[in-house]
Image: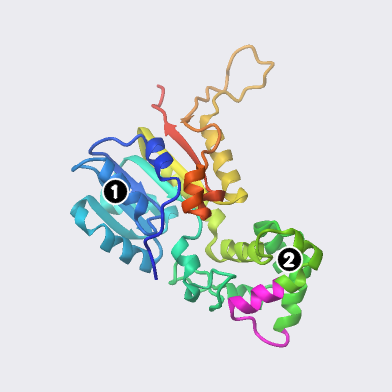
Amino acid sequence: MNFQHQPVLLKQTLSSLNLRPGGLYLDGTLGGGGHTEAILQATGPDGRVIGLDQDDEALAAASRRLQPFGERFCPIRANFADLAQVLAAAGVSELDGILLDIGVSSYQLDEPGRGFSYMQDGPLDMRMDRRAERTAADLVAKLSEAELADLIYRYGEEKFSRRIARRIVEQRAQTPLESTKQLAELVSAAIPAAQRRKEKQHPAKRTFQALRIAVNDELGVLERGLAAAFASLKPGGRLAVITFHSLEDRIVKTYFAGLAKGCECPPEFPVCVCGKQPQALLITRRPQTAAEDELQSNPRARSAKLRTVEKLEKLI
């Protein structure tokens, strides 16, 4: 498996984090270690990074890649939603910056055995943390038709979710759906031919996204992780988040907007009585996206969006 994938929006991320020499940073989605390597290089001989990943293969590969940095890099197998407990166990109270690069990694997509890809045949797995019990095959086998349709519509924004769910239930009554190829072909057949001809992307993409999100509780993890990450920042520290689809980006945008909002009194009030102060400064009011040169070398960066906030000092 190749872990040497290109980290997306690398220049924008390093700039947004406002890196400080000797600072302590956390990469909550370590992956292949590309972002972490760049942070360590940019923060001088005293800069440190704690790298979290729930994928054992990613953690092992990144640790090998970052071995030259010695104790400046601390790898920990954990989900970034649990970073408060991780930091407490490590004796760390505050961080200078945090990066969360959300979603499935390139190496996971490219490895058929992990079951994320609709382009290659493999087991219908999709677990980012292989210690978890529930797989995509379990969802496909056990959910009712209505539950499947709701899941595919809610997490995949797939308008043919009912047709797809019906086909899944009909098929599993005859033969268990256990491979990515089986499911991808079934989904393609469920979508009208005219719609398939109009689309540029694979017809199974949205269904696979929906199952992956459900298997890994990705949106719930993101919501919990954002709150834990912001609480762990020093005043002046920054939280940078890279998302890859609208559901993730909407959660980040809404959370950041809430942090940056101050007074919530009705507009007709002559003076503020709620006393609410902004907790953060929006560094990116609009998300940063990949430039054309990056898209040429890394087409998967096309859907990436970067949003960043800076934690403000508490007012007494």
- Label 2 residue SS: helix
Give the mark, 2 or 1, whose residue is nearer the N terminus: 1
Tell me the residue at 67%/73% (across/down): 143
User: Depth check: 129 or 118 in front?
Assistant: 118
Q: Give the range drawn in magenta.
A: 173-187
Furthest residue toward bottom: 174
Instruction: Pick the residue in front: 171 or 228.
Output: 171
Q: From the viewer's perspective, is 74 left or right of 128?
A: left
- Separation of disc 2 and disc 1 at Cα? 42 Å
Tell me if residue 139 is in the magenta stretch.
no
Q: Is mark 1 on a helix, strand or loop?
A: strand
Q: Which mark is residue 149?
A: 2
Residue 159, percent from left and from top = 76, 59
Does residue 160 appear anywhere in the picture?
no
Q: Is residue 291 visible?
A: yes
Residue 82, compared with residue 19, is above or below; it is: below
User: As shown in the figure, which amino acid type bears the numbered disc 2?
Assistant: Ala
**In the image, what residue type sits under mark 1?**
Val
Q: Is 186 inside the magenta-drawn segment?
A: yes
Residue that mark 1 sits on: 49
Circle 2 crowding by C-alpha within 10 Å: few under 14, some 14–19, many from 20: many
Q: Which mark is residue 80?
A: none
